[in-house]
Structure formats: C-alpha cells, structure tokens
Amino acid sequence: MVLLTALSVMSRFAINMPLPDDYELTRLLLGIVVCWGVAGAFRNESHIYLDVFWGRLSDKVKNVVSRIGALISFLIMSGYCAALFIKVQDTMRAHLQTLDFGIPIWGFQAAAWLGILAAVLVLLKQVVSPARTESVSDPYETAEVAGGT
C-alpha cells in the first residue's frame, strides 16, 4: 500500500500522470490492513482498557469482566462478519471491477472478510476459554512498579 502510494506520487511528479487505479487499490488494501489489524489487536489483547476501573478489580472480577467484554465483542464482530460476507457475495455477483485495470473488487473484500473472520474466531476462543488475568501483564506497568521498587 505504501509502495503503491509512493510510486503514484513519483509518477505524478516525474511525468505528471498518476498510476492507474492507484487510489482505488490503495483504498481496498487499506480495508484489508484495517480488518487484519482488528484481528491482531484482539489476538494480542492490545485493545483499549479502562485502567481507572481495571486496576481496582480483583483477579476473579477481571476474569469475569474480560469474558463479558469478549462476548460483547464477539457478538458485534459476528454481525459485522456476516454483513461483510454478504457484501462480498453481492460484489462478486455484480462483477464490480476497478476502473482502469478491471481487477475484481470482491477479492480484496474477501481478504478483508477473512481478517474479520479471524477476529471472530479469536474472540470465540476468548469467550470459551479466556486467558487468566494474573498471567496477562499490564502493558503500562514498568518493571520498577512490578518489582515493588
């Protein structure tokens, strides 16, 4: 995606002509990156926590809250996954293509859908068998604070 953008900028500067389909391909690639980034964030559990409340909870309550949060996220992402799958099918049936090269768009959407499907599967695992909170380190906690010094 970055390479495509850089080449387009250079071609505009050098020959005063953009690369064909550069905007559309970059937009489609960005969708793939975002969807797989969501899956990665859920897998690594590197999404947003409310530290004000989280730090005051016991480990048992943290486990319950984590499971409830994973369940809510699972339900929302499952709905999004289903909607995106329907969108991929509609795009495939409509034979939508990029303007200049005629590349089928449904392939890009299917790659993004696979990222959301991966996120749903990760969330399902977290709902069924969540990681124990005491084994999960706080990303904001430093070694000095953790060691009590």
Image: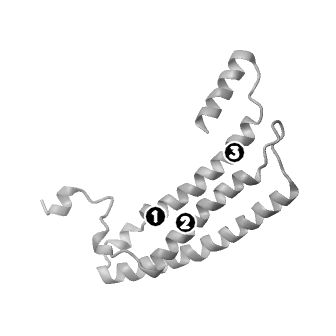
Q: Is residue 107 left or right of residue 73?
A: right
From the image, state whether disc 3 or disc 2 is nearer to you: 2
Give the camera-side residue of 34 and 139: 34
Q: Position of residue 53 (x, y in %)?
A: 37, 73
In the rendered image, the quadrant that contains the N terminus is: top right
Which residue lies under the disc numbered 2? 119
Which residue is pictured at 47% across the width and 79% down the height? Answer: 127
70 shown above or below 20: below
Q: Position of residue 86 (x, y in %)?
A: 76, 67
Looking at the image, do the residues carrying marks 3 and 2 touch, with CB atoms under 8 Å apart? no
Q: Secondary structure at mark 1?
A: helix
Looking at the image, do the residues carrying marks 2 and 1 touch, with CB atoms under 8 Å apart? yes
Which residue is pictured at 27% across the width and 60% down the height? Answer: 141
Which residue lies under the disc numbered 1? 43
Give the camera-side residue of 58 and 127: 127
Which residue is pictured at 56% across the width and 70% down the height? Answer: 120
Residue kind at label 1, given as amino acid type: Arg
Q: Give the Cα separation between the discs numbered 3 and 2.
A: 21 Å
Which residue is pictured at 77% across the width and 32% down the height? Answer: 20
Q: Quadrant of residue 9?
A: top right
Q: Position of residue 107 (x, y in %)?
A: 72, 52
Q: Give the Cα separation between the discs numbered 2 and 1.
A: 7 Å
Which residue lies under the disc numbered 3? 27
Q: Quadrant of residue 114?
A: bottom right
141 shown above or below 27: below
Q: Position of residue 22 (x, y in %)?
A: 72, 35
Q: Earlier in the sequence, mark 3 or mark 2?
A: 3
Residue kind at label 3, given as amino acid type: Arg
Count of numbered labels shown in the rendering: 3
9 shown above or below 28: above
